[in-house]
């Protein structure tokens, strides 16, 4: 659960051009709508070689959360960067793989 009960995002800049995004709480229509531009702008503006998402504390996500991951992955691919999510619950990882396969990503 996120500190205070909401969705919390934390960014860390690591050596080697890595930007880490740590998520507490849910990524759903309500929370993603409020943070989509912040997340995309922050990551695109940083131009990292690699984006690492730490989803160990993520409580879940819906289609909007998956859409955000897809957007970040596509933007990283366009800039020849890497995108990696760690700690994603198995059922969410499977849903994300299926969604990305269906959309050709």
Image: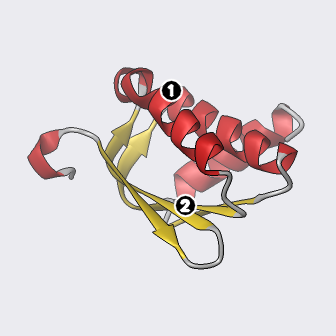
What residue is pinned by disc 2? 90
Q: Residue at x 65, y 52 (%)?
A: 94
Mark 2–mark 1 Cα distance, whole angstroms, equals 27 Å
Count of residue discs: 2
In which quarter of the view is residue 11 placed? bottom left
Residue 61 tag number: none
Q: Are marks 2 and 1 in contact (CB under 8 Å)?
A: no
Q: Decide: few, some or many residues near mark 2? Use Cα within 10 Å; few <14, some 14-19, many ≥20.
A: few
Q: Where is residue 72, by image quadrant? A: top right
* Residue 60, image x, y percentages: 40, 45
Which one is nearer the viewer's eye here, 26 or 84? Answer: 84
Rendered view: 68 above or below 48? above
Look at the image and name its color scheme.
Answer: secondary structure
Compared with residue 103, is residue 54 higher up or lower down, i.e. above or below? Answer: below
**Kind of element beneath mark 1:** helix
SS under mark 2: helix
- Residue at the extreme bottom of the image, as rendered: 15
Q: Is residue 75 left or right of residue 36?
A: right
Q: Nearer the viewer, mark 2 or mark 1?
A: 1
Q: Residues within 10 Å of mark 1 (few under 14, many from 20)?
A: few
Q: Residue at x 73, y 37 (%)?
A: 99
In the rendered image, residue 98, in percent from the top left (x then y), is placed at: 75, 43
Q: Quadrant of residue 101?
A: top right
Mark 2 or 1, nearer chain start: 1
Can you name the residue that lies furthest to the left here? 4
Which quarter shows the C terminus? top right
User: x%, y% of residue 46?
Assistant: 60, 50
Which residue lies under the disc numbered 1? 37
Q: Position of residue 58 (x, y in %)?
A: 37, 53
């Amino acid at each position: 659960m996120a500190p205070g009960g909401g969705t919390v995002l934390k960014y860390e800049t690591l050596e080697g051009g890595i930007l880490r995004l740590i998520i507490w709480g849910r990524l759903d229509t309500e929370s993603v709508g409020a943070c989509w531009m912040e997340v995309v702008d922050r990551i695109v503006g940083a131009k990292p070689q690699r984006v690492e998402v730490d989803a160990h504390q993520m409580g879940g996500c819906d289609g909007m959360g998956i859409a955000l991951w897809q957007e970040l992955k596509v933007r990283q691919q366009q800039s020849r960067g890497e995108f990696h999510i760690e700690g994603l619950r198995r059922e969410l990882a499977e849903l994300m793989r299926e969604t990305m396969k269906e959309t050709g990503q």
